[in-house]
Amino acid sequence: MSDFNDFSSASVSEKAEASELQRMIAVEQQKAQFQAQVHNFTDVCWEKCVDKPSSKLDSRTEGCLVSCVERFIDTTLTITNRFTQMVQKGAH
Amino acid sequence: MDSFGSDFSSGAAESGKMDPGTIMEQVKVQIAVANAQELLQRMTDKCFKKCVGKPGGSLDNSEQKCIAMCMDRYMDAWNTVSRAYNSRLQRERARI
């Protein structure tokens, strides 16, 4: 059984297959990262927006959830930008 | 749950290598399973908080009904959040 990290003996087609596989796996990983973020946002925004579980998600709650996602992302960007500035200015 | 990716023999050719199709199948299944587990764990946490007051000797009827409703609402919320996040990503990509 050849070493999986040694591609020197692999044919051209085997190498092409391996990198295509890597690309396809990377696509699935990106999808999984998206799902993970949705889990996080849903967790946080459920706390902010849902009081009593009812028979249907009313439009007010829906609106709140959408706004929550947007504002959470805005907050992330704000913090990232300001923190970058702080670091560049040499703050501790 | 036996079909969830534990049998690696079916895709192996004579050389012992698995074809990319089988590998991708299994990758997708494993990711889907992990996703479902995450959903259930968070849903259980939220719905227990919302529906179960002082824990009694069993889950009474109102608690059971609340849990069922809560599950549906949590999944609705998940879908709403998923759409909102997707929209935002597309908007950000359009700006670049």
Image (cartoon, coloured by chain):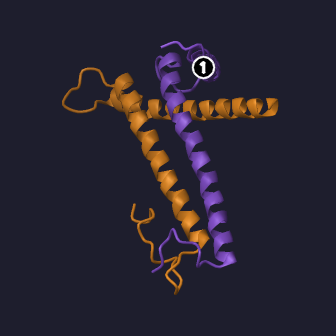
Look at chain B in the picture and name its colour. Answer: orange
Residue that protrudes farthest toward the left in the picture? B57
Residue designated by label 1: A84
Figure check: B11 above or below B39: below
Residue drawn at x 62%, y 64% is: A21
| A17 lies left or right of B41 | right
Look at chain A in the picture and name its colour. Answer: purple
Residue that protrudes farthest toward the bottom in the picture? B14
In x, y percent, where is residue A9?
58, 79
Q: Closest to the observer: B31 or B83?
A: B31
Residue type (three-letter) at the residue carrying disc 1? Thr
Residue drawn at x 35%, y 32% is: B64
Check disc 1 and report its element: helix, strand or loop: helix
Q: Closest to the observer: B94 or B55?
A: B94
Figure check: B1 above or below A12: above
In x, y percent, where is residue B47?
39, 29
The quarter of the rendered structure image containing the N terminus of chain A is bottom left
User: Hey, which quadrant is residue A62 in on the image?
Assistant: top right
Figure check: B19 above or below B77: below
Q: Closest to the observer: B87 or B89?
A: B89
